[in-house]
Image (cartoon, grey):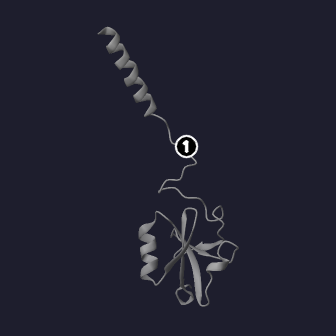
Amino acid sequence: MARFSLCLVFVGAAALLSGCQSVAPEEPTIFEYTSPEISGLMPVRPFPNPDDVCQLLGDGPATAALKEDGRRLIACPKHEKGAMEDRRKQGARVVGNATHWVILSISANRVR
């Protein structure tokens, strides 16, 4: 009986320790994102206001195929659902992704 109890203690301790492994810091979470530049994007400025998380994008190799006449590209962090919804209400539509960023296309008339 003592041998069986000792065995259970070791099995329990091993299970407890295996559940304490940390997640590698390089694994993305929905609350962390890379800078637009690291994602291959060319940010010009925050959009639509200086304190917003979305970025108006400049021309670059990562977005060249997404350009359309009369439209500008913006990017928002993937976890910023509210900001993306606000951009959609302004007429933006999702056209692509870049690492932790969602790329949207919006009428150039909406960009000041």
Q: Is residue 101 above or below residue 1?
A: below
Where residue 36 appears, as percent x and y from the top left, is 61, 65
Residue reaching furthest to the left = 1
Q: Is residue 5 above or below residue 47?
A: above
Residue bearing mark 1: 24
Q: Which residue is painted at 57% across and 88% down in the image?
A: 108
Judged left or right of residue 3, residue 99 is right
Q: Is residue 11 above or below residue 101?
A: above
Residue type, mark 1 in image: Ala
Q: Which residue is painted at 55% across and 62% down in the image?
A: 100
Q: Is residue 81 above or below residue 109?
A: above
Q: Is residue 48 visible?
A: no
Question: From the image, which quarter does the C terminus lie in?
Answer: bottom right
Where residue 61 appears, as percent x and y from the top left, is 70, 73
Depth check, front residue: 14 or 99:
14
Where residue 42 appears, as percent x and y from the top left, is 66, 71
Depth check, front residue: 58 or 46:
58
Residue 99 quadrant = bottom right
Judged left or right of residue 66, residue 28 is left
Where residue 30 appears, as percent x and y from the top left, is 47, 57
Depth check, front residue: 66 or 55:
66
Q: Which residue is painted at 52% across and 68% down in the image?
A: 53
Q: Which residue is painted at 31% across and 9% down in the image?
A: 2
Q: Is residue 38 visible?
A: yes
Depth check, front residue: 95 or 1:
1
Question: From the image, which quarter does the N terminus lie in?
Answer: top left
Instruction: State the SS at label 1.
Output: loop
